Amino acid sequence: MSVDVKEFIPLMPEIFLLSMACIILIVDLYLSDANRSITYGLSVISLAITGLITFQLMPTSPEVVLAGTFVSDQMSAVLKMFVYLVTAIVMVYSGKYLKDRSIYKGEFFVLVLFGVLGMMVMISAHSMLTIYLGLELLSLCLYALVAMHRDSMNATEAAMKYFILGALASGLLLYGMSMLYGASGTLDLGELAKFIAAGDQTDLVLLMGAVFVVVGLAFKLGAVPFHMWVPDVYHGSPTATTLFIGTAPKLAGFAMIMRLLVEGMGDLHAHWQEYLIILAVLSMVIGNVIAIAQTNLKRMLAYSTIAHMGFVLLGILAGNEQGYSAAMFYTIAYAIMGLGGFGMILLLSRKGFEAEDLNDFKGLNDRSPWFAFMMLIFLFSMAGVPPTLGFYAKLAVLQAVVNIEMVWLAIVAVIFSIVGAFYYLRAVKIMYFDKAEDHSPITSSADMRATLSANGLLVVALGIYPSGLIALCVQVFS
Amino acid sequence: MESIYLTIALAPLIGAIIAGLFGKQIGRAGAHSVTILGVAISCALSFYVFKDLVFDGGAIFNGAVYTWAVSDGIRFEVGFLIDNLTAMMMVVVTFVSLMVHIYTIGYMADDDGYQRFFSYISLFTFSMLMLVMANNFMQLFFGWEAVGLVSYLLIGFWFKKETAIYANLKAFLVNRVGDFGFILGIALVLMYFNSLDYRDVFSASGHMANVTIQVIPGVDWSLMTVICILLFIGAMGKSAQVPLHVWLPDSMEGPTPISALIHAATMVTAGVFMVARMSPLYEMSETALSFVMIIGAVTALFMGFLGIIQNDIKRVVAYSTLSQLGYMVVGLGASAYAAGIFHLMTHAFFKALLFLAAGSVIIAMHHEQDIRKMGGLRKYMPITYITSLIGSLALIGFPGFSGFFSKDSIIEAVHASDITGSGFAYFAVLAGVFITALYSFRMFFIVFHGKERMDAHTKSHLHESPLVVTLPLILLAIPSVVIGYMTIGSMLFGDFFKDSITVFSQHDVLGKVGEGFDGALGFITHGVMGPAFWLAMAGVATAYYIFMMKPEIADNIKQRFHFIYDLLDNKYYADDFNDKVFASGSRGVGKLLWKVGDENIIDGMVVNGSAKTVGWVSGIIRHMQTGYLYTYAFVMIFGLCGLLSYLLFG
C-alpha cells in the first residue's frame, strides 16, 4: 500500500498536537513544581496553534484520506476548534483547584492533550476502526484523569466504576461493529452506507449491529438507561476532571453519532430513530426528575447533563439537516454553559474545601454579586430562559422536532424542561434569598475570574445574537 | 430629515434614562438639566420641522425607520408620518412639556422623588411623541399604552398616599376598558386590511364601505362603523369621555405639573388626535360620527355642571378639562376635525396655563387646595393673578382670546351639521358656554378676590412664586392670547390640514362656516353678535353676582335644590355605580375563581399535585442509583435487552 505524502496534510493538526504532547511530557520531566505553569502555558499555546492549523486547513468539501480511514470536512473543523477552545478554558479554570490539592502535575495536562487527540481522531474518523481508536484513546485518558487524585476514596471508586462500565460499553460497541463488518464486509463508513443503500435493509445482523452501536454511543453520551456512571463519575472525580469530562467529550460524542449513524447508517434512519426516541425521552424524564432530589451540585449537574443529552438526541433523530445543525448547536451551547456551571464550583472551592454542595452557594449574592449573577446566567441558560444561549438551543431542537411532525415529542421535551427549571431556579433562589453560611472571600486568580466572566457574558451575547453560531451550524450541514 | 425626526423622539428618552437610572449619581441639578436639555432639543427641532413643513413647503415624510418584525407578510415597523397635523402636535407637546419641565424645578423643589419625577415626565414626552409621529397602528398603540403607563406612574407618584394609589389604580382600570375597545378596533383593521400602515389602510378604506360583519350572529353591521366605534372607545378612555371619564378628576392626586402636562394639555387629547388622524375612516360612517358627537356633547355639558360645585382648585380645572374635551369631540363628530384639533391646540396652552397657575397658588398656600380657604390673592400674587385671568378669559371664549376662536368655530360647525344628534349637541355646547363661564369665574373670584379667608400663618408667608414658576406662566399666557387670532385663517378655513384630514363634501361643515369668513377680525365681530358671547358674559356676571355680592344665594340654592346638589356632589353617582357593580362584581367573580378555581383546582391539584408527584417519583427512582457496580452493569444490559427485544418483537 503506497501512501502519498499529500494525504497527511489534513492530519496536520493531529500530528502537531501529538508531537507537542510528547514534547510537553518530556519538558515536564525537567520542571520543578514551582515552574509547572510552563507546562500549562505550553499546553494552552499548543492548543492555540493546533486551532490555527485547523482553521488554515478548513476544507470546503470533505476530503477522505489514508485509505478511507480519515475524513476532514467542515463539521470536523468546527467541532475540533470548539474542542480546543473548551479544553483551553478547562485548563484556565483548573489551575488553582489542582494546586490546592497538590495534583498540579504535568500528567494532568498531558493526559488532557492526549484526550483531545483522541477526540480529534473520533471527530475525523471515517472508519469504524478509527472511531474505536479515538474512543479508546480518549477513554483511557479520562479513566486516568478521574483517578488522578489517588488519595481520594471517591475518586478511586469513580475511576474503577468508569473503567469497568466503560470497558463493558466498549465491548458492546465493538461487538456491534463486528456485526456490521460481518454483514457488509467493510469498515469504511462510506462503503457501509453504500452497502446498506444497495442491499437488504431488513438484514437482522445489520439491524442488531445497529442496536449494539447505539448502546455504545448512548453510554458515551450518558443517555438513559446507560447513564448510571455519569453521576458517580461526575461526583467522584476532582472537579477539574469533571469539568473536562462534562464538556469537550460531548462534542466528540456528537461527532461519533453523526459519523456512525448518519454517515454510516443513514438509510437505517427509520430504525435508529426509534431507539433514539426511547433514549431521548427516558433521558429527559429521568435526568430532570432525579436532578430534583439531589443536594450535591455536581450530581445535580450530572443529571442535568443527562437531560441535555436527551435534547441533543432529539435533534439528531429528526434525521435532516435542520435537526443535525440544531443538535450541533445544542451540543456547543451545552459545552459553553457546562464550562460555566462547573467553573463556578471551581471558583468557590479552596484548599480543603469543595464547594460542591447546593448549600455552599447560599447567599452567594452577598459574597459576590457579580459571580452570583454569572451563575444565574448559566442556570437560566441551562433552564432555557430567554435571552440566553440555552433558550435558542432548545428552540432550534424543538423546531426541528416539530418540523418532522413529532409534536408529542416536543411537548414531552417542553414539559420536562419545565420540571427541570425547578432545580435550576431552586439554585438561583438559594444564591439570592438564603443567608450565607460561608463568608470566606473568593480567592481565585485574575485570569480565571476574567475568563469566567467572559464565559457568562458569552452565554448572554450568544443568546441575544445567536444568528452567527446558528448560521455556522447550518452551513456545516448544507 | 429622518435623523432629525429620530432625534426629536429620542432626545427626551435619553434624558429620561439618564435621570431615571443614574439619578443618584447626577444629583438633582443634573437630573433637571439633562431632561430639560433633551426636551429643549426636541422642542427646537420640532419648531424647525414645523417651519420647514408649513412655511418652506417641505415634503411630507412617511416612511419606516426600523422594521421590527415581518410575520405572515404583515410588517411591524417603527415609522414616522410627519405632516402638518403631526408637526403641529409635536410643537404643542414639546413646548408645553418644556414649560412644565422648567416649572417643575420650582414646584417639586422639596420633593424626595425629584429625579424620578423628571425621568417620568421626559419619558412621557417621548411616548407622546411616538404616538403623534406614528405612521402605523402598532406604534400608535405603543405610544398609547406608554403614555398610559407614565400617567399611571405619575398619578401614583406620591405612592405613600392612599388616595393616590386608589386614583392610579382607577385610572389604570378605566383605561383598560377603553384600550380593550381600541385593540379590538386595531385587530379588526389588521384582519380586514391586512396591514397596519396608515397609508395602506386609508387607501383601501374606499373598498370597505359596503362590507358588513356580524358581531352578533344574524345582525349585519357596517365594518367601518364597528371599527370606528371600537377605536373611539379607546379614545373615550384616554380622553375621558362619559362614561369612562371617572378617572380624570381623581388623577388630580398627582403633582400639579403632570396635571397640566398629561391630564390637560397632551395625553388626554390623544383620543381627539387619533380620531382626527383616522378621519378617512370616520368619514365613511355617519353612525360612528353621530355616536362621537353625542358622547362629546354629553361630556361637554354634564361635566361642566360638576365644575360648579367643586371646592378643590384642581378639581374645578379638571372638570373644566373634561368639559372642554367634550367640545373637541363634538367638533370631531360634526366632521369639523380641524376645529377639534384647533381647540386641542388652544386648550393645550390655556389649560396648561390654568393648571400651572393653580399650582402656583397651591405652592403659595402651602399645599392647600380648598378654594374656600383662599381669597384676595390678587395683591399677593400679581403675575399669577394676571396669567390666571388670561387663562380664564381664553377658556370662556372671550372675543379675541385663543379659546374664543376655537370654541366658536366648533359651535358654528355643530350648528351647520345635520347628522343625527346635532340638534342636541348644539344645545349642549351653547349651554356649556354659560356653565363654563360660571364655574371658571366662580373659582377666579373666590381665589383672587373677596375676603382673605386663609389662616394667619399662611397669610404671613404669602408671596409671588419664584421665576422658574412664573416664567412658564408668562410664556404660556402669550400663545393663550394670540395663537387663535394668528392661526384661525389657515388652520380652519385654509389648506393647513388638506393632506392630513379627509372630509367628505356632504359633511363639510367647516366649508359652510368658512363661506362667510373674512379674516379673524370679522370672525370676532360676528362672534360678538352670536349667542355664545352673551351666554359667556351672562355666566361671568352670574358668578360675580352670586359669589361676590350675594354669597347667601349660593347657600340658598343649595338648600332648596339639595337633590340636584347631591346629584352633582356625588358626580351623578357614577363612582358609586362603578364601585358597587363593576368593582365589587369583578372582585366577587375573582374571589370565586380564586378560591375554587385557583386554590383548589389549579394550585391544589395541578400545581402542587404534580410537584408532589414529581418529588415523590424522584425520591423513589434515586434509589436505583445504588452505588453498586453490578446494579449499573445490570441496568445497562437490561437496557440493551430492551432495545433488542424492541427490534425483534416491537
Image: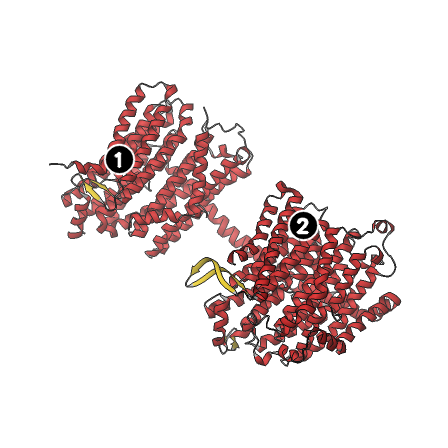
Q: Are marks 2 and 1 on the same chain?
A: no
Q: Indicate which disc residue B62 carries.
A: none
Label 2 crowding class (10 Å Cα cut-off): few <14, some 14-19, many 20+?
some
Residue B539, placed above or below residue B22? below
x, y (%) of residue A325? 32, 48
**Gap in angstroms between the C-alphas marked 2 and 1:** 66 Å
Query: Can residue A169 be seen from the camera position used here?
Result: no
- Occupied quadrant, residue B432: bottom right
Residue B82, placed above or below residue A324? below
Helix, strand or loop status at disc 2 = loop
Please give the chain letter of the residue carrying mark 2: B
Please give the chain letter of the residue carrying mark 1: A
In the foreground, A155 or B325: B325
In the foreground, A375 or B87: B87
A159 displayed left or right of A363: left
In the foreground, A154 or A148: A148
x, y (%) of residue B409? 68, 74
Q: Residue furthest left?
A: A1
x, y (%) of residue A405? 33, 57
Which amino acid, by three-letter code, is at mark 1?
A: Pro
B324 displayed left or right of B545: left
- Residue at figure coordinates x 37%, y 19% from the top left: A33
The residue labelled by disc 1 is A13
x, y (%) of residue A213? 24, 42
A386 displayed left or right of B249: left
The residue labelled by disc 2 is B159
Which amino acid, by three-letter code, is at mark 2?
A: Phe
